[in-house]
Image (cartoon, rainbow, N blue to C red):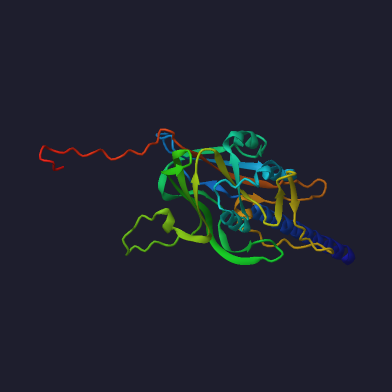
Amino acid sequence: MHDRVRSILISSALAACIVASVSACSIGKNKADQSDALQTEIEADTRTRDSARGLQLRVLNVDDSGDRVARAFARYMDNSGTMRPQDRDRWNQWGLRWVVVPQSELDSILDQMDLTNAIQIRWMGEFPQWRPIIRTGELDNTNIRIGDSSLPIFRTLDGSPRLLARVWTKPELTEEGLQSKLHLDLAVQLKRKNAATNVWIEPKLQTAIEEGALIEELTMSQSLDDSSALVLIGVDPNTTWDSANQIVQEGDTTPDVGPSAPGARTLGQRMLSTPGSGYVAPGVRYNPPKKVLIVLVPKTDDNYRILAPAPQRRDAGGSP
């Protein structure tokens, strides 16, 4: 009798351990899924279309299985437009890859994407003050990698990364004469966490630029016409796109023996991509890799003109 009771108690204890282990695995898996989930959201509001000049924003959430995004945009890697190579390279080191796409080909390229959510479009027009365009999940003293993994630099970041912009029309003298261009400033900001309000201080309405520090390396100015669009994609600096063959070549950073722990990701990857679940066992749900594409489409107005000052009239006495 005692042996039977002992057997029942042992069986119950083993069952409890198994349940606890399964629950722990489930909780761990859920946490991993949450950490890999994309949290990119639009902050820009839609403005009344009272002007033909300004900036249009498109945001696409896409399935990146089979490196679909890279294979679609690799052909444009040699096209830098008016973007300075040093600006492009600096953003790329942070995992933020700019691609310049002719507007005449933009829709056909975007149509190749496998959307996971409906495309979002905002007409923002012109705005000379800094405005947030998109924001992403909060970083809590997170280790961020800069550059490829062979000679990486690491930086600890805290706050919510978001892309800021300001844009206005300007005249520019070119070989074809005076043209209407858009001046575009871009920056990445770490928005501070909400702090408790001090009731003894007079409340002040903060502007976007005052809500957090800018990352100095991630600022840029552009002069744009409506011939090309800018597409921002989160890509590991280890990954190179062969524009001639339109293929993807990834730097091999995997050790020869044994599994490797996931390394620190770049800011662009954290903001705009998720690696998915990779290989999974039969019967386990597969989560594909995903990317968020930030598309900036400039619009200019051919009717924009610079008016010369009117000549002053003179009276009979010859004075103005």
Horizontal side, residue 196 vs residue 266: left or right? left
The spot of residue 149 in percent (x, y) is: 70, 63
Residue 29 placement (x, y as % from top left):
71, 55
For image coordinates 65% across by 40% down, the residue present is 116
Q: Residue at x 51, y 61 (%)?
A: 216
Q: Position of residue 260 (x, y in %)?
A: 77, 62
Residue 81 occupies which quadrant of the picture?
Answer: top right
Most foreground residue, 148 or 65? 148
| 265 vs 128: above or below | below
Q: Is residue 126 visible?
A: yes
Query: Which sits in the foreground, 252 or 309?
Result: 309
Rendered-image quadrant of the C terminus: top left
Residue 126 lies, with reference to residue 137, above or below; the image says: above
Viewer can see residue 37: no
Left or right of 292? Residue 4 is right
| Whole-percent x, y for residue 210 in the image | 42, 58
